[in-house]
Image: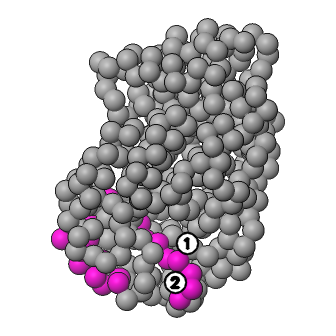
Amino acid sequence: MKITDLRTTPVRLPLAEPLGNATATIHEFSCLVVDLITDEGLRGENLIFTIRPEQLKLLDSMVHVLRDAVIGRDPDDTGAFWADAWRRINFIGFTGVSIMGISAIDGAMWDLKGRRAGLSISRQLGRCRETIPAYASGGLWLTQDIPSLVRQAEGFVAQGFKAMKLRLAGRIDVDLPRVKAVRTAVGSDIGLMVDANQVLSADEAIKLGHALSPCDIAWFEEPVPAHALGDSAKVAKALKMPIASGENEYTRYGFLRMIETGAASILMPDLQRVGGVTEFARVGALAASFDLPISSHLFPEMSLQLLAHVPTAHSLEYLEWFAPLYEEKIELRNGEAVIPDRPGWGIALERSAIDRYVI
């Protein structure tokens, strides 16, 4: 069996209400569906996205730049593809859109080889678990007032979530009342994460972290710019609460630098930016070598397969941004996400939905 065609389909997912964090207000998501077709008619699929619609063409172009690295390959040769693609991006760099292009094709190859073998990706990698704790990340935005935050937080608890994440503005006078209100609403048994989306300096983050400390924060996410590993390490040393980061990091080399500098105690690889299934698994092995927990970033339908494999997997970031494009929703049981064991990703894209949202 050989891969004979690569196809991309751009889709747009409008939001019923805008989502706001400290850096942006989001009105829609622009996604790229990536399909690999074999000479026997078998198809493997993947999904990548961008918040800014004008960047979708750039992602699409990068995927097609790497077309020659995958056409003609056996679907099982994911390692050979990754190594070839890595050589091809040497001149344009080993971070950013070039890695996203590798991720797009790599994930589709893994889905394809899973369908060929009749195995889920996690079974191919080596499965460690059947469920993973999920935290609610699809709410508690800066665009919401405190009464709205409280209602939504209580709703998450009613749905069975044992943890949730709230976005910060980066100002004590704004953030502290919001965090206190949510903590009071959900009680002491619910994990409460906070995310500053990189807007603080190290000193500001330390000051805010100390102010929030009585609220029993499960983790403080990206308190400083993602590239400022030294500043993140400074914050981590100054605060008792865990620092979580990694969604903006690329490949195992980026995560090795994070570990070496002590920038975070919870690593958060993003399937799209880390380098796809192949590189996520490598980062998982790296994290396990240092006994560091991993929590996925975005793409919950697909990240489940990697969290099933990584020994130190901590939790799934659960949100329904891409749910309209899938045939079914993730199954939740008492705050745990059930990891599907069907071939490939285990949850397939809904082709009629893709047709409905196609650009």
Disc number at residue 220? none
Under mark 2, the amino acid is Val
1 or 2: mark nearer the eye: 1
Locate residue 235 relative to residue 343 in the image: left or right: left
Q: Which residue is mark 2?
A: 182
Tell me which numbered mark, 1 or 2, is placed earlier along the sequence: 1
Q: Which residue is mark 1?
A: 164
Between residue 6 and residue 235, name the one nearer to us: 235
Residue 208 is covered by the magenta coloring = yes
- Give the quarter of the image for residue 335: bottom right
Between residue 219 and residue 292, name the one nearer to us: 292
Q: Secondary structure at mark 2?
A: helix
Q: How many numbered discs?
A: 2
**Residue drawn 56% across the image and 24% down it:** 78
Locate residue 358 relative to residue 205 in the image: left or right: right
Locate residue 229 relative to residue 191 in the image: left or right: left
Q: Residues within 10 Å of mark 1 (few under 14, many from 20)?
A: many
Residue 195, compared with residue 162, is above or below; it is above
Locate residue 45 relative to residue 317 in the image: left or right: right
- Give the quarter of the image for residue 135: bottom right
Residue 53 at x, y percent in the picture = 51, 38
Q: Can residue 230 be seen by looking at this rendering?
A: yes
On-image quarter of the C terminus: top right
On-image quarter of the N terminus: top right
**Residue drawn 65% across the image and 48% down it:** 127
Residue 248 at x, y percent in the picture = 38, 47
For the residues labelled 1 and 2, the Cα–Cα distance comes to 10 Å
**Residue drawn 76% across the image and 46% down it:** 341
**Residue drawn 72% across the image and 39% down it:** 120
CB of mark 1 within 8 Å of CB of mark 2?
Answer: yes
Residue 348, compared with residue 190, is above or below; it is above
Under mark 1, the amino acid is Met
